[in-house]
Amino acid sequence: MTWAMRTVAVACAVLAWRSARAAPVAAAQEDPLYVGWASVDITPDRPVAVIGHFNKRIARRARDPLTATALAIETRGENGGREAAIMISCDVLWIQKSMQDRLRQRLKSELAEFDVRKLFLNATHTHTAPGFEDETFGKAYDVSNDPGVMKASEYGEFFVGRLAKAAVEAWKGRKPAGMSWGLSQAVVGTNRRAHYFDGTSVMYGKTDRADFSHVEGGSDQGVELLFFWDDAGKLTGVLVNLACTSQETEGLSEISADFWHEVRLELRKRHSQDLFIFPQCSAAGDQSPHLLFRDRADKIMLQRRGLSRRQEIARRIANAVDDALAAAKSDIRTKLIFRHTVAQIDLPEKTPPAESFYKTDPVRPIEVHALRLGEIAMATNPFELYLDYGVRIKARSQATLTLVVQLSCQHCGYLPTQRGVEGGVYSADKYVVGPEGGQVLVNETVRRIDELWK
């Protein structure tokens, strides 16, 4: 090739590159948004054993109600194409696969036009709610010799019936709507594992010991928010995603939604009594609202404010919501790109298999949902997932904001990190899926989120 020919070739290549840069990229389809809400009381109507600890606790009264909140989302394209989801947030310890399967089976006839695969549940992880299956904890929770006490299986039937009512009401109540998102901050969750100079960790370990080294992991104070509006611009509900389990008063022998009860009270006092609040727990397998240090100062501040710690947590979350609300209201979208995929993923199990504290659901496969709502992504997992995995997903996701939802669809126990396994003890010594499987979960989740942007 002569010098002149090379010059022409280079010039043509530059022009082609500039043309490609200047050419408009075909926009993905934004379709009108429809949203429906419903809320039902899932408080048992009889005494029942509450789960979350390894001693049997019979709750004979309710300190506050357990709630299930259903959110139905749909977009309708001009060509008849539709996308949909029904998600239900539940004030329970976890979601078991059998419950979600039974609910889907029931809804096949009641919501024939809805693809029941696009329904998924998540738990707030309160330790003061009933279980669903009699054999989950073996003999430790046997109530056959406790007269008048509801069995876990009886509560499971009650639970599915109430959730079916909420799902149908939310789906049939879909109306034109708008959505906006917000990001705020609130100090709620903190890492609960103290690490010592000998290389061991202890959940809620003492930090005033001379051999205390550091808190094993970090925390995430972000509060990720989705706001939903009716066609008149009124706020109808808010989805609140934060990396903390609902277990401030976890040891009660009473029915309780824990701090989410106070959050509902506070937000409705500030905004509207008919406001729907949809809690999601992000990756928080090594997090809780309990403090490892500075707890005496915290108690004094609570006394000065005249608040319980649950009320203080609610104040912080409500402040975070209000802090983001004005900015979110300036960018309400009544049309958006909505995509929803349901994946079955096989994860490598620990070898040799771990002894389990309780019966877990199978991990071959696990069910994972990935959603795109405009520039927002949401991804579920069935674990008590250590925070680091959630951070990896959020950092690698190409969405503007990514909501990770743990304890969703089924329950597969803790998924600890490598440093957690090395520290040992509860939450990191008996597990079905370990660090290798955790990274597979991260990679597969990120891949499925990215596919929603193709």
Image (cartoon, rainbow, N blue to C red):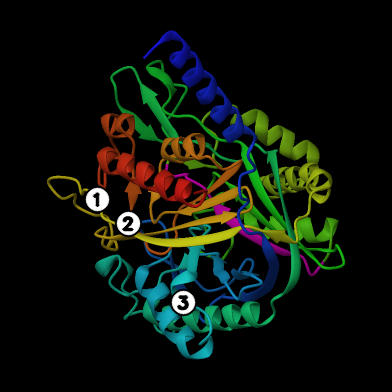
Within-10-Å neighbours for mark 1: few <14, some 14–19, many 20+: many
Any part of residue 328 in sight: yes
What residue is drawn where x is 56% and y is 35%?
A: 220
Within-10-Å neighbours for mark 2: few <14, some 14–19, many 20+: many
Q: Which residue is mark 1?
A: 432
307 lies above or below 332: above
- 446 or 394: nearer the viewer: 446
Q: Is residue 435 magenta?
A: no
- 179 or 130: nearer the viewer: 179
Asked if the residues shown at circle 1 and circle 2 are in contact, with their CB atoms under 8 angstroms apart, the answer is: yes
- 118 or 411: nearer the viewer: 118
Which badge, 1 or 2, is on the more N-terminal residue? 2
Q: Which residue is mark 3?
A: 116
Amino acid beneath label 1 = Val
What residue is drawn where x is 25% and y is 68%?
A: 138
Residues rendered magenta in the picture:
273-285
Foreground tag (1 vs 3): 3
